[in-house]
Image: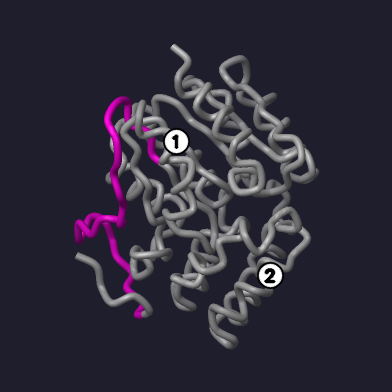
């Protein structure tokens, strides 16, 4: 079903039904998890092990990541591909995964019964800033191709954004399962500069929505507050104390309690 990872393989869902790689566990209401850039579906393994007693959990390798490394899709077609695998469910997305899940919820709201958005955004509104981000992502993509995945992952994790992670929580070995071609393609197709801003459409979302950010991640905490304000009364804000950009890794117990509580609400 999957091509050889590391070789570029752009597809059109209308031409071929290549499915994103995924794993499924447990029984109950379905919950779909989508990871962030440089991660794989394995990032959720501790959280999903806490949920399988109550939910059917589906963890997906996003386009250009993990075992989906040779499936190159932009944000819109990637969201559609995620919906093809996940079906009707609650969707949980972190960072890039959050942007995929938000895009799916706007495009196919009938598939998304609940939505959890973690450390994510509805896009960059300023055109000049978007273009600058596209250029920045292109430079990063070229660097990945030049230096390879191991060195890039070390540079990526050294950013202040991930200062709350440790050698025990940064999941470096899992991130090394990605490929240079896959990661560079992800930046070029799905980087934040490529995301069309959807702030004005958030009020159209009617499903229950939980927006999560780390208290120490000022940029995304402010974005989370704005997301909730723009969505309206069906949105709930959860700020995880003593956490930065990766609350599911930095404060897994607090994060799990918040997400389980939201998913369990009638």
Residue 214: name its quadrant. Answer: top right
Residue at position x 44%, y 48% from top?
45
* Crowding near the residue tagged with mark 2, few <14, some 14–19, many ≥20 C-alpha atoms within 10 Å: some
Give the mark, 1 or 2, whose residue is nearer the N terminus. Answer: 1
Q: Position of residue 146 (x, y in %)?
A: 58, 88
Q: Is residue 107 left or right of residue 14?
A: right
Out of 106 and 34, give the one closest to the viewer: 34
Q: Secondary structure at mark 2?
A: helix
Out of 163 and 198, give the one closest to the viewer: 163
Q: Is residue 111 magenta?
A: no
In the image, the segment drawn in magenta is 7-32
Q: Main secondary structure of the magenta part?
A: loop
* Crowding near the residue tagged with mark 1, few <14, some 14–19, many ≥20 C-alpha atoms within 10 Å: some
Q: Position of residue 196 (x, y in %)?
A: 57, 48
Query: Which mark identifies residue 173?
Result: none
Q: Is residue 121 visible?
A: no
- Residue identified by numbered label 1: 50
Q: Is residue 84 left or right of residue 232?
A: left
Q: Is residue 16 magenta?
A: yes
Residue at position x 41%, y 37% from top?
107
Q: Is residue 172 visible?
A: yes
Q: Nearer the viewer, mark 1 or mark 2?
A: 1
- Please report contact status of discs 1 and 2: CB closer than 8 Å, yes or no: no
Residue at position x 52%, y 33% from top?
116
Query: Which mark identifies residue 136?
Result: 2
Separation (CA) of disc 1 from disc 2: 38 Å
């Amino acid at each position: 079903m999957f091509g050889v990872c590391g070789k570029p393989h752009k597809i059109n869902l209308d031409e071929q039904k290549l499915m994103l790689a995924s794993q499924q566990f447990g029984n109950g209401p379905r919950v779909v998890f989508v990871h962030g850039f440089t991660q794989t579906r394995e990032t959720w393994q501790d959280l999903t092990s806490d949920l399988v007693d109550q939910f059917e959990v589906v963890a997906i390798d996003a386009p250009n990541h993990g075992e989906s490394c040779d499936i190159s899709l932009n944000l819109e077609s990637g969201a559609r591909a995620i919906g093809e695998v996940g079906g009707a469910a609650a969707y949980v997305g972190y960072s890039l995964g959050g942007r995929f899940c938000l895009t799916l919820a706007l495009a196919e709201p009938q598939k998304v019964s609940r939505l959890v958005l973690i450390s994510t955004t509805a896009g960059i509104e300023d055109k000049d800033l978007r273009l600058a981000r596209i250029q920045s992502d292109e430079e990063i993509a070229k660097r990945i191709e030049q230096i390879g995945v191991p060195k890039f992952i070390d540079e990526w994790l050294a950013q202040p954004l991930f200062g709350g992670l440790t050698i025990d929580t940064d999941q470096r070995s899992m991130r090394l399962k990605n490929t240079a071609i896959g990661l560079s393609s992800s930046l070029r197709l799905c980087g934040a500069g490529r995301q069309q801003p959807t702030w004005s459409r958030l009020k159209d979302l009617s499903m229950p929505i939980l927006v999560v950010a780390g208290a120490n991640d000022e940029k995304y905490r402010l974005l989370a507050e704005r997301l909730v304000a723009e969505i309206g009364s069906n949105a709930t804000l959860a700020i995880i104390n003593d956490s930065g950009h990766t609350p599911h890794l930095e404060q897994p117990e607090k994060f799990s309690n918040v997400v389980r509580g939201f998913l369990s609400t009638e």
